[in-house]
Amino acid sequence: MTSRDCVPLPVRRAAMAAAEALAAALREWAAAAARQDAAWRAALDACAPLLGSLAGLAAQMRAGQRLAWGGSPLGAFGELQARLWWKQRGAAEALLEQLGSRRAELRDVRDAVGAGVAGILRLYEERAAELGLAASLQRGPRSPSLADALEGLQDVERYYRHLYLESKLLLLRISCDSLPDMEALPQSWERILERYKEDVVQGSSTSSRPFLELSALEAEDTLLKISLFVDNHRELYCSPGS
C-alpha cells in the first residue's frame, strides 16, 4: 500500500482542486508578467536617450557659465546669457517631464507585478490546508515544487521593486542646480542597469535574500521555474507516489 492509498479520496480531490486553482492563477500571472515585462523594458529603453539629452544640455549650460560673456562679441547683447539659460532650463524641464512619464510606467509595472504576487499568495494561504504542506514541498521528475514556484514569484516581484526604487531615486535627484551630476546621468543610469544584468547574485537563498539584488537573468530563471510548475503540475500531483 502506498502513502497515497492511505489518504482518503475526498482529501486527495481537495488537494488536487487546490493545486488546479493555484496552477491556473500562476498561469494567468505568467501571461500578464510577460506583457508587463515588455512594457518595463520599453520604459527602461526610453529613459536612456532622454538622459543623454539631459547630459548634453548640462554640458552646454556649464560651457555657458564658463564663457567670458563680457569680453566676447556676445557681450553687446546684455540679455543673451540669461535668455539662453532659461531656454536651456525649459528644455531640461521638458525632458524631465518625459522622464516622469517613463517613471510612472515603471511604477505601474512594479505595482501590477506586486498585486499579482500578493493575490496568488493570498490564494495559497486560503487553500494551504486543503493542499497540505507535503504537497506544497513535493517536486516532480520535471517540475519544481509549488513552494519553489511561490519563492520564484517573490524573487521576480523583488527584482522589479528594487530596480524601480533605484531608478526612481536617480531620476528624483536630477536638478539644474547640479550640472556635473546631470552631465553624468548616462553613466549613472548604466551602472544601475548593469547591477541588475549580472547573472551572479551575491549571497545565497537564505533568509537574507530579500535584501539582495536579483539580476534580470535570475528573474527570467524564476519565471521558467513557474512555467515548469504550471506545465507539469498534473504530473506532480497525480503521480503514483503522490
Image (cartoon, rainbow, N blue to C red):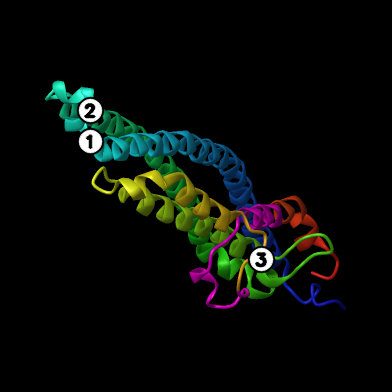
Q: Does the magenta stretch include residue 66?
A: no
Circle number at residue 68: 1
Q: How far apart are marks 2 and 3 (CA)?
A: 69 Å
In the rendered image, the quadrant that contains the C terminus is: bottom right
Q: In which quarter of the image is residue 194?
A: bottom right
- The tag on residue 148 is 3
Is residue 111 visible to us here?
Answer: yes
Pointer 2: what residue? Answer: 72
Question: Is mark 2 in CB contact (under 8 Å) with mark 1?
Answer: yes
Magenta-highlighted residues: 203-226
Question: At label 1, which amino acid type do we have?
Answer: Ala
Q: Name which of mark 3 and mark 1 comes first in the sequence.
A: 1
77 to the left or right of 156: left
Q: What residue type is labelled 3?
A: Asp
Vertically, is 75 above or below 65?
Answer: above
Q: Residue 50 carries which label?
A: none
- The structure residue drawn at horizontal position 66% and vertical position 54%, both measured from the top left corner, is 217
| Left-right relation of 94 to 186 | left
Rendered location of residue 132, percent (x, y): 63, 72
Kindly indicate the quadrant of the structure image that contains residue 152: bottom right
The Cα atoms of the two marked residues, 2 and 1, are separated by 7 Å
**Could you tell me residue 59's position as x and y percent?**
36, 38
Disc 3 versus disc 1: nearer the observer: 1
Q: Which amino acid does label 2 sit on?
A: Ser
Check disc 1 and report its element: helix, strand or loop: loop
Residue 99: where, in percent of width, then height? 37, 37
